[in-house]
């Protein structure tokens, strides 16, 4: 049995390890298109602020980890998949047959359509190679423009700010992290950053990146007529699933690779996991791409089990969950944080203390939440949402005071345990 896993990120690494446990005698190949050992993109910000070195980003610390497991590593790009012949073609021309194939190629940064975006000194922050360039240029006294205040942008913001550089963030939306925070929380986060000497321009579009005329080599021109001189420009304007190499393969692709509840694609013996998979959403029952590491790990484990043992494990759906640390302020969002039609909500906001909680209900169940400055009950919020516990009288209490979430969780779980015991 030959298993091939394309993609050396968290989904791919978890998958090959799970495959080895379940199929001790099978041949397993992990294909990654970067020259480094498998590493975590989520660790790059820690590399930027020098908390870890490059080796610290590696997903497995032992250099011979995969050798010990009998897993072959191919550092090549997959250029084509032939589902009919059950083979993949690598960039060096090699063709490899498979019995089962897992596509775990993740996502790639979206390059904004801005004149000058290909200029020297303009980088995304996605690979270790990008990070090396940023470390080289992000020095005290330098001027940095970060285009995009979404999840990725805010992850690296702390590293840029602590470098001693002069940082300006330009975001086209009217608030920061618009895909996980509402207007209130997103603008509280903006104020937090500004108080820490980061200039944040929301509702502002970059029209061009030009050559600078003074000491700074770059100039960022905005639609409000302002121009910002910079030594370094970083683009963080979203990601897109890495699936172009599947053109002509017969594998159906929409936002990502379309999969069923077993993470199998439209083609037998071809599976997908992680940021490239359009998998089931826990809250809606629909299928979409969730570009977050917990989903990638869960996908990798379940897909590997189904590849090795047949369709025994259903994927019940991933909870859309984001937890973000921006200059020391923790924000989070869970599931249907924006609410649902016909639902109810509750919020508490303490702007001066940078504390905010927003809860979303459907009937008598918590279906979503977002928080700012509150970290104590992040796990409890997720637990209530995933368990779909009925709140009974606690819904009204939470609408009066959303911070009583721990009390609600304990009361509801104890009630369920008591009723189960009585039955």
Image (cartoon, rainbow, N blue to C red):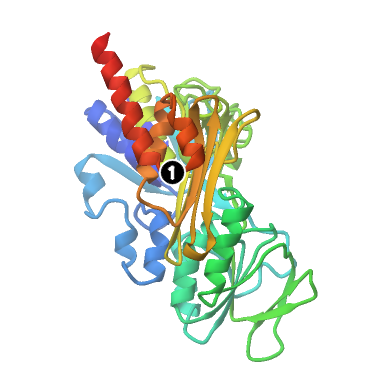
Number of labels in the image equals: 1
Q: In which quarter of the image is the C terminus?
A: top left
Where on the picture, by quarter, is residue 109? bottom right
Q: At 52% from the left edge and 26% from the top edge, which residue is drawn?
A: 259
Q: Which residue lies furthest to the left in this view?
A: 68
Where on the picture, by quarter, is residue 385? top left
Q: Residue furthest top?
A: 423
Q: Toward the viewer: 305 or 328?
A: 328
The correct choice, above or below, for 103 with respect to 35 in the image is above
Q: At 50% from the left edge and 67% from the top edge, which residue is drawn?
A: 157
The correct choice, above or below, for 413 with respect to 12 in the image is above
Sort mark 1 into few (<14), some (14-19) or many (20+) by Cα contacts within 10 Å.
many
Q: Which residue is tagged 1?
A: 7
The correct choice, above or below, for 256 with respect to 362 in the image is below
Q: Toward the viewer: 293 or 250?
A: 293
Secondary structure at numbered mark 1: loop
Q: In which quarter of the image is the N terminus?
A: top left
Q: Toward the viewer: 50 or 98?
A: 50
Q: Is residue 352 left or right of residue 187?
A: left
Q: At 35% from the left edge and 40% from the top edge, which residue is drawn?
A: 406
Instruction: Give the image location of residue 167, x and y in percent.
Output: 56, 76
Q: In this view, does 382 lie to the left or right of 291?
A: left
Instruction: Give the image location of residue 331, x and y in percent.
Output: 47, 54
Q: Toward the viewer: 32 or 281?
A: 281
């Amino acid at each position: 049995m030959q298993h091939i896993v394309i993609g050396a990120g968290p989904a791919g690494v978890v998958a090959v390890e799970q495959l080895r446990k379940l199929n001790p005698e099978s041949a397993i190949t992990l294909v990654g298109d970067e020259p480094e050992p498998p590493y975590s993109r989520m660790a790059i910000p820690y590399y930027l602020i020098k908390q870890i070195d490059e080796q610290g980003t590696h997903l497995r610390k032992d250099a011979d980890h995969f050798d010990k497991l009998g897993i072959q590593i191919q550092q090549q790009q997959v250029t084509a998949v032939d589902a009919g012949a059950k083979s993949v073609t690598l960039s060096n021309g090699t063709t490899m047959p498979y019995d089962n194939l897992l596509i775990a190629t993740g996502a790639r940064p979206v390059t904004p359509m801005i004149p000058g975006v290909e200029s020297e000194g303009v980088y995304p922050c996605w690979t270790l190679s990008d990070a090396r360039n940023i470390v080289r240029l992000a020095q005290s006294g330098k001027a940095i423009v970060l285009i995009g205040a979404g999840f990725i942008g805010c992850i690296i913001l702390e590293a840029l700010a602590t470098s001693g550089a002069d940082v300006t963030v330009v975001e086209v939306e009217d608030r920061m992290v618009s895909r996980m925070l509402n207007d209130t929380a997103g603008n509280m986060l903006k104020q937090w950053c500004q108080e820490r000497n980061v200039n944040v321009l929301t509702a502002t579009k970059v029209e061009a990146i030009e050559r600078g005329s003074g000491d700074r080599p770059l100039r960022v021109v905005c639609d409000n007529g302002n121009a910002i001189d910079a030594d370094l420009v970083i683009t963080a304007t979203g990601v897109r699933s890495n699936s172009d190499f599947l053109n002509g393969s017969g594998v159906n692709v929409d936002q990502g690779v379309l999969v069923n509840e077993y993470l199998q694609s439209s083609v037998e013996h071809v599976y997908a996991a992680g940021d490239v998979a359009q998998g089931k959403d826990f809250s809606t029952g629909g299928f979409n791409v969730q570009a977050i590491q917990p989903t990638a790990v869960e996908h990798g484990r379940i897909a590997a089990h189904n590849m090795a043992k047949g369709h025994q494990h259903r994927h019940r759906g991933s909870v859309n969950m984001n937890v973000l640390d921006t200059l020391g302020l923790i924000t989070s969002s869970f599931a249907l944080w924006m609410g649902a039609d016909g639902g109810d909500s509750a919020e508490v906001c303490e702007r001066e203390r940078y504390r905010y909680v927003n809860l979303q209900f459907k009937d008598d169940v918590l279906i979503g939440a977002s928080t700012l400055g509150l970290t104590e009950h992040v796990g409890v919020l997720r637990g209530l949402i995933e368990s779909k516990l009925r709140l009974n009288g606690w819904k009204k209490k939470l609408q009066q005071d959303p911070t009583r979430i721990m009390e609600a969780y304990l009361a509801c779980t104890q009630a369920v345990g008591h009723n189960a015991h009585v039955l």
